[in-house]
Image (cartoon, coloured by chain):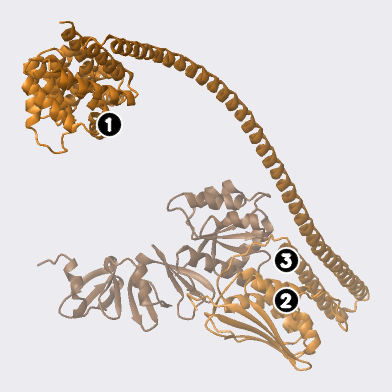
Chain colours: A brown, B orange
Amino acid sequence: MDKINILIIEDTPEEAMELQEVLVENNYNVVGVANSHQEAMVLFYQLKIDIVIIDVFLDGNPDGITFAETISTIPNALKPFVFLTSSKDRQIFERAKLTKPFSFLLKPFNELELLYALEIAMEKFYGQSNVFSSESQDTIISDDYLFIKKKDVLNKVLLSDIVYIEVENRYCNIITEKERFVIQISLGKIGEFLDAKTFVQTHRKYIVNINAIEKIVLNDNLLLLKGNLKATFSGKYKDIVKGFNILK
Amino acid sequence: MYLIRSVFFLFIFNLPFCVLSQSGSKIDDLSIVLKRINDKYEKEKDFDKSQYFFLNKNWDSTLVYSSRALDQVKDLELLDYCHYMRGYSFMMKKLFNEAKKEYGLVSQDFRFYYKITRNLGGIALEQDKYDEAISYFNELEKLSNDDDYDFVRSTVIHDLGLCYFHLSQFDEAEKYLLRSIRLQKNDTLLLIGSYMDVANLYYEQYKDDVAIPYFEKAYSLAKKTKDFELRKNATLNMAVVEENRKNLLKSLAYRKEYEIWKDSLNDQNKVWAIAEIEKKHALERKQKQIGLLESENKIKISQRNGFVVSSILLLLLLGAGIYFYAQKSKTNKIILLQKEELDKLNATKNKLFSIVSHDLRSSVSAFRNSNYKLLKGITNRDYETLVPIVHKNASIATSTYNLLENLLHWATLQTHQLYFNMESIDLFSVVRQVEYDYMPLFENKKIHFENKIVKSIFVLVDMDSLKIIIRNLFDNAIKFSNEKDTVSVYTYSLNDDFQCLVIEDTGMGMNEETRKGLLREDAVLNKKKNQKGIGTGLGIQLCKSMIGKNKGKLTIESIEGLGTKMIITLQKNISNG
């Protein structure tokens, strides 16, 4: 699992510092702090970012919203973001509301409020609401990553790193070449958000990354995977073999 | 010879009469047909005009328009009618050859072809072509006796008789003329003509004894009529007869009478002319009078219109005046109401200001005093006393901060500047976030806090206002609890639509009066009595407003000395309920 990369856009150095400290304490990775709109644009394109925290007012102007509006208009560039603001001024909020989806955090805020705002931003951005506040789920699926909440903190796993997924009741074991861990997610959600061409069900319990298959042992119904991992496939899902060119 | 010549002279007078006399009945039937045809061919303007003039016996105009119509009309039936009208008009103008030509152009199928035969016969008679005339008349005689043919049969017979008379076939002539007399018993004018012709017939044959009674009959009948022409002829005939009988005195008398009729005919023509002129004058005078009356009417109408317009304008003005007056009094009423409301609000605001500033003053002065103590403790190096003082300072700062926070929210709420966004919120997360800030306060007062809310209870609220509500209720719970009391938060489902969030303390509680006072809609801010801590009642007011804005409800259950339950009823988020 990897840390989430955060870009902070905040013009007051103390506040930026405080924010950074809280985030780092909670195992987030602050990749950059920008204190103006221009700097923010530069960093936004330079760095690999998962989420942006934006102060609405930069040097007294609502440049934070301008930034959000700008990245909203660029296709594929948009990332989840959280607005920071000290007043619930209606005019500002009406404008911010236009840059959908958005989440906001009212100053002064405590640690829990910050973490909650980050979760809400993720949920809203990927259109999978009420995930992190529920008992039965802790994972959001994006195109490239799984975002997993572990003890109030979000982490991510690159989808292409996953070798296979083992389903067990309400839990799933995620197995990568390096590690294995348990997430909570419903099978329906996997079906809905995971790319069916890459992740294929081979067994009642197994979902395998097709790119990680190294060998198919038909006699034993066995799949040899990357990193010396193995998974079985059952007769019901035998069709998967047809997808491959069989050497004779 | 003289006699014959004079008789002959008379015939000429009789002829046109016979032909023309038919026109009356002839046109009646024809006119209906013409009108019908005209309706059928509405587009033919010229035909329309020519038939109109034809029916009004304006022969010249008929000729002009029918010649135009002939150029345009293609329909065979219409063409026949045109030719017929032209022929008839020519005949009436005594242009017999032209008339014959036009009649010749009418096709044999023409509905009124028998009329043409009749007219051709008449023309032949006029032109002294007696044999030809006889053949035409015989043709007509052959036609059935029905009413289908609307010409006066007796006139045909009469004309036939005349023809034979002119051809000196007296027997034939006598036969027809007597027959026509029998047929004409009801028509005096025709009868007189026939009598005279019969008389002439006999007279020509020197049958004077038979002839003279006819002449006398004609004369006596003519006397009763108003037709001067007939009377003149009848008288002249009598004069000639008497002259031939050498009865010169009588003859002279008839001659004189004849002269009178001749003159009277002329006089009548003159009288008619004068009458015509007078009529014209009278008409002009009438026209002038009409013109005058019309102009008077115009003036009257314009006067009346002017009156109507001005009265309408006045009415409108009156209406507008009343309307504006009503509007004004309405706005006045509204302004008055608004003023009262404003006064009330202003009073509230003033009271709030005085209370808030008083509270702030007392809390800041407490701050100053404790700071003074702190400073003294530091100077005396009495470090043990410092810790409680710092804690006290912190709590004063917190409560002051809360007061200011509430004031700010209250202000934004009052000025409608608060951004409000209701969405699905997990109650557990929200309470946990607020709780995080309050843990030190609970611990400070050694209050046991329990969050019994389970995850995934979603309600539809604006999150920040819910936080403000919970904060205030926590504040109150702490304020009205003693050490080692318990504050707990839990939820329960009221029904399918509402979820209740309860903040319960085991503190001092309140009496019924206070409870009702807190929940009253128009509760005015009151300085709380018997309270050491600061408090304005602003917090609970803010809570009530915020809950109301979240479409929720606040209820309070309390037993004095045992504790209080603050129950917030909120909308469930149906989709994620």
Q: Position of residue B64 (x, y in %)?
A: 27, 16
B73 is higher (above) or lower (below) than A188: above
Which circle, 1 or 3, is nearer the viewer? 1
Residue B76 can be seen, yes or no: no
A73 on left or right of B121: right
Q: Chain of mark 2?
A: B
B230 is higher (above) or lower (below) than B493: above
| Front residue (pair B228, B324) | B228
Q: Position of residue B21 (x, y in %)?
A: 24, 24
Residue type at mark 2: give it: Asn
| Tags 1 and 2 on a common chain | yes
- The numbered mark, 1 or 2, whose residue comes first in the sequence reads 1
Residue carrying label 1: B42
Residue A143 can be seen, yes or no: yes
> Which of the 4 image quadrants contains residue B89?
top left
Assign the N terminus of chain A to one quadrant of the image: bottom left
Which circle marks residue A244 in the picture?
Answer: none
Residue carrying label 2: B472
Which circle marks residue B409 in the picture?
Answer: 3
> Count of labels shown?
3
- Label 2: state its secondary structure: helix
